[in-house]
């Protein structure tokens, strides 16, 4: 993938203005953060919540793969490089799932959380699998002129109904 494509994507989707909008719209977006013992932000998740119980994922190809409703999208999971492999991502993923378990959309708790991750990103895939996500298919994702292929992964959030929910990690005081 060309550097200019990545930079254009960041400029188009990951600006301060975008994050200000995410933080201002709690009905649609949920941001959870993890901090180090000295209060430094070391990671976060951004979840896109459906506005109605029957709202499908935004892309038709994903909606065909993610059939549970309501379904929340795990849009972003970022951990500073120094903290990768430390368990912070697992704590954030569990805290995100726990947060979704107490939310309601039209009186119904989200049934599933889904994400797309680059097919070549094996490290992320292993992390998501440990957190109870399973691969349900693929989608195409454009970054500038580059057409990337993502794996679509889903975690069932319905208590007692998930075939395999993976290993559970307890949130620590650094997660808020």
Image (cartoon, grey):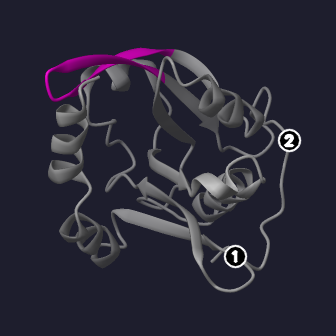
In the image, 91 versus 11, the foreground residue is: 11
Query: Which residue is painted at 44% across and 19% down in the image?
Result: 65
Q: CA distance from mark 1 to mark 2?
A: 23 Å
Give the x, y percent position of residue 46.
45, 58
Query: Which residue is painted at 48% across and 17% down in the image?
Result: 119
Measured along the vertical axis of the image, is residue 15 above or below residue 85?
below
In the image, 10 versus 51, the foreground residue is: 10
43 with respect to 26 (left or right): right
Q: Quadrant of residue 154?
A: top right
Question: Which image quadrant: the C terminus?
Answer: bottom right
Give the x, y percent position of residue 100.
58, 59
Magenta stretch: dominant secondary structure:
strand
Please state the extent of the stretch shown in magenta in the rendering.
Answer: 137-151
Say whether disc 1 or disc 2 marks the residue closer to the N-terminus: 1
Measured along the vertical axis of the image, is residue 36 above or below residue 118?
below
Measured along the vertical axis of the image, is residue 93 above or below residue 25?
above
Query: Which residue is painted at 52% across and 50% down in the image?
Result: 77
Q: Which mark is residue 17?
A: none
Residue receiving disc 2: 167
Query: Which residue is painted at 35% across and 26% down in the image?
Result: 63
Measured along the vertical axis of the image, is residue 49 above or below residue 159?
below
Residue receiving disc 1: 36
Give the x, y percent position of residue 166.
81, 36
Q: Is 139 one of the magenta-colored residues?
A: yes
């Amino acid at each position: 993938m060309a550097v200019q494509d990545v930079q254009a994507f960041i400029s188009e989707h990951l600006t301060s203005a975008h994050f200000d909008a995410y933080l201002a719209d709690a009905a649609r977006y949920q941001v959870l953060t993890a901090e180090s013992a000295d209060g430094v932000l070391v990671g976060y998740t951004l979840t896109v919540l459906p506005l109605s119980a029957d709202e499908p994922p935004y892309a038709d190809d994903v909606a065909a793969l993610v059939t549970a409703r309501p379904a929340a999208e795990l849009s972003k999971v970022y951990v500073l490089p120094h903290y990768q492999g430390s368990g912070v991502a697992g704590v954030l993923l569990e805290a995100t799932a726990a947060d979704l378990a107490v939310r309601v959309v039209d009186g119904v708790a989200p049934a599933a959380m889904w994400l797309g991750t680059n097919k070549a990103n094996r490290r992320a895939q292993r992390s998501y699998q440990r957190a109870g996500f399973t691969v349900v298919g693929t989608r195409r994702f454009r970054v500038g002129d580059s057409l990337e292929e993502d794996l679509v992964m889903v975690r069932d959030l319905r208590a007692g109904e998930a075939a395999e929910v993976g290993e559970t990690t307890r949130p620590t005081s650094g997660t808020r």
